Amino acid sequence: MAKTRQEKEKIIKDLEEELTKNEAIVLVDFKGLDSKSLFDLRSRLRKSKCFLKVIKKTLLEKVLEKLKKKELGEKIKEIKTEIALVFGLEDEIVKAKICYQFSKENKNLEILGGIVGNQFLEKEKMIELAELPSKQELFSRLVGSLQNPISNFVYILKGNIKGLIYSLKAIKESK
């Protein structure tokens, strides 16, 4: 059933709001997905506070035009298949990671690209982003890197004290 003009205007308004709030958006082709797989993808995204929104390209183009992002609109016009947008406010990369992991498990989902800031990123760049370690992994690596020299220093100091104790013990026993 066709949408009324008011429904389309509401969709455009909501989409405009989402595009201004989100720093990064992933564009995916979901054409070959069955409903079970699509539901599975949505539940994975929901766990990470992300969501998938199926949108007509013409409505997306209108929103981008309204936001004065014509270059992005031109890139969207080049896409020949149906698209869905993946949004999320928590982490910019987590949505790309989830989509990439899902696309490896299910060949019917394809990452088409993404919008990061005011730039359109091609499929290859979005996959590179998805392969980056998460913030949590980077923080744990940083903590490990900072902790390693300190723990080594403590170990060396312990070794010097142990050596001194062994020397004193040897002197005491020799007397």
Image (spheres, rainbow, N blue to C red):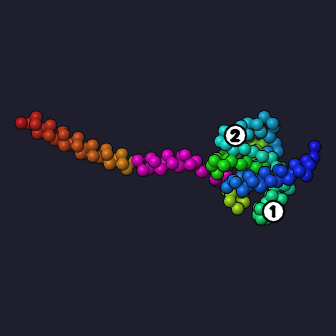
Dominant secondary structure, magenta: helix
Residue 160 position by quadrant: top left
Kindly identify the residue that appears in the image at 78 percent across and 46 percent down.
53
Of callouts 1 and 2, which one flags the residue occurring earlier in the amino acid sequence?
2
Which residue position is annotated with label 1? Answer: 65
Q: Find the magenta span and give its range.
A: 126-147
Q: Position of residue 65 (x, y in %)?
A: 81, 62
Quarter of the rendering occupied by the C terminus: top left
Instruction: Name the amino acid, label 1.
Output: Glu
Q: Is residue 31 left or right of residue 99?
A: right
Which residue position is annotated with label 2? Answer: 46
Q: Is residue 83 left or right of residue 20?
A: right
Q: Is residue 117 above or below residue 37?
A: below
**Does the magenta-highlighted stretch encompass residue 161?**
no
Instruction: Name the amino acid, label 2.
Output: Arg
Mark 1 vs mark 2, CA separation in Å: 29 Å
Q: Position of residue 33 (x, y in %)?
A: 80, 40
Depth check: give the residue in front, 157 or 32.
Answer: 157
